[in-house]
Each structure stands twice: as C-alpha cells, then as structure tokens.
Image (cartoon, helix red, strand yellow):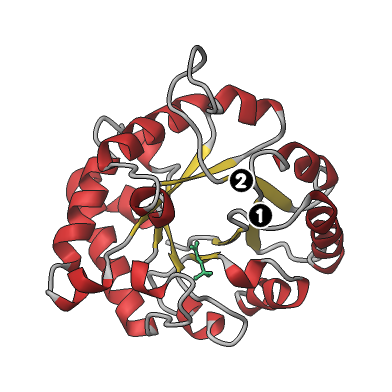
Amino acid sequence: MSRRIFIAGNWKMNLLLVEALELVGKLKEQLRDVKAVDIAVCPSSVYVQQVAKSLSDSNIGVGAQNVYYREKGAFTGEVSTGMLIDVGVKYVILGHSERRHILNETNEDVNLKTQAVLASGLTPIVCVGELLAEREAGTTELVIKSQIESAFVNVAAADMKKCVIAYEPVWAIGTGKVATPDQAEEVHLFIRNLIEKKYGKDIAESVRIQYGGSVNDENAKEILAKPNVDGALVGGASLKVEPFVKIVKSAL
Ligand code: PGA
C-alpha cells in the first residue's frame, strides 16, 4: 500500500498577516510543480481565510490549529467546523501537545473534536506524543496507546481511513532534539498496529502517520524514508520559505 506523503506546516501563534501572505506567495510559486506530495499550512485562525484565498489556485491546502466540537451557540472565543469550512479550510490539527499541556486539553476533548471534524467532512490531524519523563520511565507505548485509543472512540472504520495522525514526542517539539528515524519508526509502527487491531489491516495501512518535532531541511529526508513515516508536521521550519520548500522536496 502506498500512502501519499503529507507535509504540513504548523505556524502556531506566529506570523502577522503581511508575513503570512508573503510566505504563502513564495511557497505557492516554488512548490507549484510538486504533484506527488500533499502540502498544507496551518495559520492562526484569524488569518486562515486570507491565506486560503491566496492559496485557492495552488496545490497547497490550509489547515486550522484547533476547533471547537459544538456546531454553534454560546461558546465565547471558539470557532466551529462550519466556520472553518466556510473560509476554505481542509484540515484541522487536534490535540497538539501545546493544547494538551498549556491549554489543558484532555483525551476526551480530542475525541469530541475528532468526531466533530469527521462529521463535518474536514480532515483531522490528530497529534499524540509522550513527554520526556514518560519516555525515560519506559511508558511511551502506554501513553501513546491511551491517546490513540481515546482519540478514536466512536469513530467508524470509514472515517478512520480519512484521519491523519501526527506522532510528536513532546521532548522533540521546538527543542532541536529530533527523534532518530528509528525512534520515530518504532512508534509509528506501534500506532499502525493499534489501528490494525481495532480496524483491520486495510484501514491501518491507509492511515497516514506524520512525524513532528524539530523536523528541518537537514533531517527530513532520513525520517521520511522510514516505511511507516508518511509525512511531517513541521513547526519552526515551516515559518520560512527555504527550509519548508526543501522539506517538501526531500519527500519527492
Ligand atoms: P517544531 O514543532 O517543528 O518547531 O518542533 C512541531 C510541532 O509542534 O508541530
């Protein structure tokens, strides 16, 4: 089974509008000929509309960094899937470690959001990953198992197929300490086996699993070469044209 590589840039709370538009203007030009890789950028929610508009004639999709799971109502400060669809969004990052650890998002929140995103027709990018202390204590698999199992509660097989998972060891995010290709592959395979146990081989083989955590233009090629690594969720290195273009092209 061959899975299309998917490279997404997670801009987090960076770039003002003029910087964002300048960046996507150049990405669009320099990545125009890339056909074999799926590409997305995930701006702050206030800019998704303008970024999506600027990318509407390109091969680069737009993702949001979060969403609320209710359709509408009295939820001050939140954004719905319908609103994201309205402004041209295709993907939604869910359960990023910064949301889990800084904004106290729980496994249950991630599950509700995953269900809402799937019901809306958007594609979730569900993030999981262990803390350094958990890795050192030898509990990586336990943590990942519980995050994966709870994220996909009440998710039917047909929907599971559409999900993207991002394995992002928390100790590797923004630290410059990238997981070795073998460390990434080991957890990716573990995740794929968990999906297989619940949904069967065909679905497990079709789900894309991105790696995230200090991916840059120097280490991307080696990580992406691993059989169970199907792309990357890129933070810091997605904020500039050259490294992001190189990361995408290293997947070709
Ligand atoms: P990083 O972030 O590439 O800056 O480590 C990745 C992420 O948090 O998605």
Q: Is residue 29 visible?
A: yes
Give the Cα separation between the discs numbered 2 and 1: 6 Å
The residue lying toward the viewer, choosing from 114 and 252, is: 114
State the mark number for residue 161.
Answer: none
Residue 111 screen position, x and y as percent: 31, 36
Q: CB of residue at label 1: within 8 Å of ligand 1?
A: no
- Quadrant position of residue 242: bottom right
Q: Is residue 165 visible?
A: no
Residue at image position (57%, 43%) is 91
- Quadrant position of residue 53: top right
Q: CB of residue at label 2: within 8 Å of ligand 1?
A: no
Classify residue 197 as left or right of residue 211: left
Is residue 142 positioned above or below 74 on the image? below
Q: Type of residue at label 2? A: Gly
Residue at image position (49%, 85%) is 222
Q: Residues within 10 Å of mark 1 (few under 14, many from 20)?
A: many
Q: Earlier in the sequence, mark 2 or mark 1?
A: 1
State the mark number for residue 41.
Answer: 1
Classify residue 72 as left or right of residue 1: right
The residue lying toward the viewer, choosing from 57 and 23, is: 23
Residue 180 screen position, x and y as percent: 37, 85
Residue that label 2 marks: 63
Q: Tell me if label 2 and label 1 are in contact, CB under 8 Å.
A: yes
Residue 116 screen position, x and y as percent: 43, 27
Is residue 247 positioned above or below 113 on the image? below
Residue at image position (27%, 64%) is 130
